[in-house]
Amino acid sequence: PPSFAYALDAAGRLRVGSLELHVAEHCNLRCRDCDVASPLWPERLLAPGEVAGTLARLRPLLRAEVLKIVGGEPLLHPELEAVLRAARGSGVGERLRVTSNGRLPRRLTDGCLRLIDS
């Protein structure tokens, strides 16, 4: 048996350090050693409603210190601000982070920047 125990919060939800939500499977780069195989995936986006629905199902079960919005490249998502609003409003993560390759900073609107912690 494992030598550690998972912690539960006051509501009985599993506490985890982070949870990653892939909102765009594709990427604008073709990095040779991509660890999520983004160069191989066709364009696929998680709609804001799917984000809200997925996180609503997870909320009674899980609480993350950081909810990470990732991809591929999440800044390729044409509805990024709506995705971030759904993630922020879900109550699943204490902090909201976007992990990007840094090549599309202009896609982070003021609205997006107000929603993320880092």
Image (tube, grey):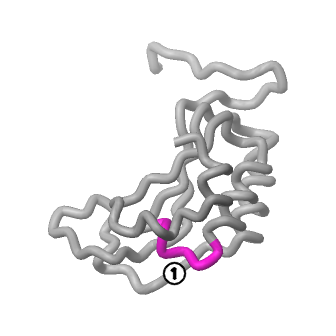
Q: Is residue 11 above or below residue 68?
A: above
Magenta stretch, residue numbers:
74-79
- Is label 1 in a helix, a strand or a loop? loop
Position in image of residue 57 (x %, y %): 78, 53
Residue furthest to the bottom in view is 42
- State the residue at coordinates (64%, 19%): 7
- State the residue at coordinates (59%, 79%): 78
Numbered-mark total: 1
Q: Is residue 89 above or below residue 16?
A: below
Q: Is residue 31 left or right of residue 8?
A: left
Q: Is residue 95 left or right of residue 25?
A: right
Q: Is residue 39 left or right of residue 100?
A: left
**Front-lying residue, 18 or 57:** 18
- State the residue at coordinates (52%, 62%): 22
Position in image of residue 79 (x %, y %): 64, 75
Q: Which residue is mark 1?
A: 44
**Front-lying residue, 5 or 87:** 87
Residue furthest to the left in view is 32
Q: Is residue 114 above or below residue 108?
A: above
Residue furthest to the top in view is 3
Position in image of residue 12 (x %, y %): 79, 26
For badge 1, the amino acid type reads Arg
Question: Is residue 69 in the magenta section?
Answer: no
Q: Label 1: how many residues lie within 10 Å, few (<14), some (14-19) or many (20+)?
A: some
Position in image of residue 84 (x %, y %): 66, 58
Question: Is residue 76 in the magenta section?
Answer: yes
